[in-house]
């Protein structure tokens, strides 16, 4: 097919999508997400290498448009569903997980949808291109029948300074605080990486963000420690942040640390204690997983050839519904540790991993977890509900949830 024909074809498809969008009063992007979701299973029929190539390119293009697709209507959740933590008001106990808005874009989209908060990044001190392998930039794939996915993006980002400057210009909506996810520069010697990380946090402080999330768990970069987390390098980094940031705060700026749900449950009490002793304000559990062999049995057999291909070719981190129980167990364990330690300052546990519905938030709440984040579940819900994504969660909140949360 010639370029001219291809362009004509693509214009025709766009026209078709736009017609459907107008008919159903959805944005072009909402329609696209719905169609993509319906066709997702088809990716599994393609040779895995082709599926990964197609999806990775499509995901990148979609993410760019998504961050600009500001919903015309604002959804304000019922006030009794909101949560106050660290003196900040979250209009819902649920918001996007880090990695969705790496450039600090898209705040208007999710805050108008009704998200309880927003987090930009992860950013590092130096701009990063992210991973490319076999000609695929930022490899990612959904496992359509398993409500899960893998990515091996490698923290592509523009750097703390650029994103902090962008966040400084955000006009906040009430009930939707702005967070920034930061990481030490992967592959850089700790002696340089740690001071650069501290400087990055200070830039975000200067930009007026409401909280900081320290990403200690990206499996897609050199230096990832897996489940052995309480190593000397981590402790030194936490000490440096405690000394140079936490001890010098001129305003209330909660700093939380994010770890993978791959952390052994037995390590969690010590980890929580380590954070509390240094003045950190919370823990996010967790990030993606690299336990490929263990989670394979939870993958629908229609997805296993893609799963085997991706995990053996790229590795990467697993996310989505397969993490639901483990994120709950890890978060519950952290809550128990916090209760046992009874710290003199507020310390919150944020659950992340496999959250997809109001029922998950209820389970979190029963475990003593007030705050939740989602990534894979968010996009699945967006495909079904479009910009009413948080409205749909709220409307499915049963009376018991309202009672539980109020
Ligand atoms: C494509 C993609 C990119 C991600 N990028 C980041 C990131 O930059 N920083 C981070 O802390 N977590 C990142 N994550 C992990 C998510 O924030 C979240 O911890 C993980 O996906 C588990 O949540 P889920 O099961 O709701 O998807 C990323 C996840 C995905 C799927």
Image (tube, grey):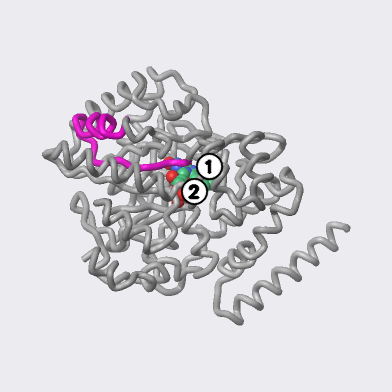
How far apart marks 1 and 2 lie (CA) works out to: 7 Å
Q: Are marks 1 and 2 in contact (CB under 8 Å)?
A: yes
Against 299, is 313 above or below?
Answer: above
State the residue in front, 343 or 368. Answer: 368
State the residue in front, 102 or 263. Answer: 263
Whether residue 165 appears in magenta in the rendering, the answer is: no
Against 85, is 265 above or below?
Answer: above
Q: Earlier in the sequence, mark 1 or mark 2?
A: 1
> Circle 1 is placed at which residue position?
295
Q: Residue at x 36, y 21 (%)?
A: 231
Q: Quadrant of the N terminus?
A: bottom right
Q: Quadrant of the C terminus?
A: bottom left
SS assignment at label 1? helix
Q: Range of the magenta residues? A: 267-288
Instruction: Identify the disc placed on residue 322.
Output: 2
Picture coordinates of residue 244 (x, y %)? Answer: 24, 27
- The total of numbered circles placed on residues is 2
SS assignment at label 2? helix
Picture coordinates of residue 215 (x, y %)? Answer: 39, 37
């Amino acid at each position: 097919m010639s370029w001219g024909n291809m362009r004509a074809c693509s214009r025709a498809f766009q026209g078709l999508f736009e017609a459907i969008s107008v008919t159903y009063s959805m944005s072009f992007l909402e329609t696209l997400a719905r169609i993509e979701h319906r066709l997702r299973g088809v990716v599994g029929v393609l040779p895995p290498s082709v599926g990964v190539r197609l999806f990775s390119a499509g995901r990148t293009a979609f993410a760019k448009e998504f961050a600009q697709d500001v919903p015309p209507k604002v959804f304000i959740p019922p006030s009794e569903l909101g949560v106050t933590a660290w003196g900040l008001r979250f209009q819902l106990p649920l918001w996007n997980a880090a990695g969705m808005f790496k450039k600090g874009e898209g705040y208007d989209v999710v805050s108008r949808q009704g998200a309880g908060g927003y987090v930009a990044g992860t950013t590092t001190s130096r701009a990063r291109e992210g991973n490319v392998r076999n000609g695929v930039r930022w490899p990612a794939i959904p496992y359509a029948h398993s409500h899960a996915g893998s990515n091996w993006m490698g923290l592509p980002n523009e750097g703390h300074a650029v994103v902090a400057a962008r966040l400084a210009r955000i006009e906040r909506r009430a009930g939707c605080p702005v967070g920034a996810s930061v990481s030490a520069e992967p592959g850089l010697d700790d002696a340089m990486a740690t001071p650069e990380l501290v400087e990055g946090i200070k830039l975000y402080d200067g930009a007026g963000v409401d909280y900081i999330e320290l990403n200690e768990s990206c499996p897609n970069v050199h230096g990832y420690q897996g489940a052995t987390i309480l190593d000397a390098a981590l402790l030194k980094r936490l000490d440096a942040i405690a000394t140079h940031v936490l001890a010098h705060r001129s305003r209330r700026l909660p700093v939380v640390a994010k770890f993978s749900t791959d952390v052994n449950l037995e390590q969690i009490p010590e980890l929580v204690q380590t954070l509390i002793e240094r003045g950190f304000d919370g823990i996010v559990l967790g990030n993606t997983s690299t336990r490929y062999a263990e989670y394979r049995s939870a993958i629908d057999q229609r997805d296993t050839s893609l799963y085997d291909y991706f995990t053996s070719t790229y590795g990467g981190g697993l996310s989505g519904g397969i993490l639901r129980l483990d994120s709950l167990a890890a978060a519950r364990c952290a809550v128990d540790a916090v209760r046992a330690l009874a710290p003199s300052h507020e310390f919150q546990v944020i659950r992340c991993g496999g959250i997809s519905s109001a029922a998950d938030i209820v389970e979190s709440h029963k475990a003593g977890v007030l705050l939740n984040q989602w990534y894979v579940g968010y996009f699945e819900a967006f495909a079904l509900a479009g910009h009413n994504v948080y409205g749909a969660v709220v409307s499915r909140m049963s009376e018991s949830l309202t009672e539980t949360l109020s």
